[in-house]
Amino acid sequence: MSQFKEFLSQYPLETFDKGQVILLAGDTPRGVYIVESGLVKTYTISLNGNECLMSIDGRETQFPLGFASGVIDKSNFYYEAYNRCRIRIVPKDDYSEHLRSDVDSLYARHLRMTIQLMSMFERIRALEQPRASGKVARTLLYMASRVGSVFGAQSNSTNLKITQQEIANLLGLSRETASAELKNLELKKLIRYSRKNYTIYTQKIEEYVEDQE
């Protein structure tokens, strides 16, 4: 067991069922939330009441970003269990003190945050695509990198469980537009859909989006 995991094991492990709100926008967090298993989605709510999905994150993600370092003192976003998940809640002062005293844990968190930042750059890249086809294709790559399940160490296929509405929410598109673009990708044999699961042929999609840009 790593020192960081040993440190986390001292604190409560809470279970949240799918759809359960973990943290509301404007709330003062009880501590630093560390995802131990499952997925958590981050979103805002627009003035007309629509959900604007920001991201879906998995194991070892910490939230809310900026709270542990004192940049914010209240949550900027809504956090909800995307599926059944388990989360450690660590008092902010304990968390900060541990990272200051343990360089290995600090470096591990630095790497994790770097990966998360690079992933968000890919999300921005998807949003900046001029056509809906490029937006959807790059968003699938982004989601596959964040929460997909790879088939085998050398596989170019990733399994992704996500709905068309969630893809539309990630991009600010209508569900109909997202559905049409997903169908187009399926016809091109870049993805395969079955029972709310998408198989993403990552190498093929990467080549496709590069040709589109």
Image (tube, rainbow, N blue to C red):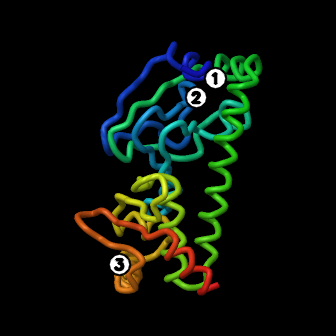
Task: State the residue at coordinates (39%, 25%).
Answer: 14
Looking at the image, do the residues carrying marks 1 and 2 touch, with CB atoms under 8 Å apart? yes
Quarter of the image where the N terminus is located: top right
Q: Is residue 149 above or below residue 4?
A: below
User: Which comes before the other along the chain, label 3 or label 1?
Assistant: 1
Q: Residue at x 38, y 74 (%)?
A: 191
Q: Which residue is mark 2?
A: 32
- Residue hosting label 1: 92
Q: Relative to residue 194, is residue 56 drawn left or right? A: right
Under mark 2, the amino acid is Val
Which residue is more in the foreground, 31 or 97?
97
Q: Amino acid at mark 1?
A: Lys
> Residue 158 versus residue 72: which sits nearer the camera?
158
The local crowd at label 1, few if under 14, some if 14 to 19, many if 20 or more residues have their Cα within 10 Å, is some
Looking at the rendered structure, the secondary structure element under dot 3 is: helix
Q: Residue at x 76, y 24 (%)?
A: 103
Q: Check the picture and name the quadrant holding the C terminus.
A: bottom right
Distance (Cα) linking label 3 and label 2: 37 Å
- Nearest to the observer: residue 142 or residue 50: 142
What's the residue type where badge 3 is placed? Answer: Ser
Q: Between label 3 and label 1, give the one nearer the viewer.
A: 3
Residue occupied by mark 3: 179
Label 3 or label 2, whichever comes before in sequence order: 2
Q: CA distance from mark 3 to mark 1?
A: 42 Å
Q: Disc 1 on helix, strand or loop?
A: helix
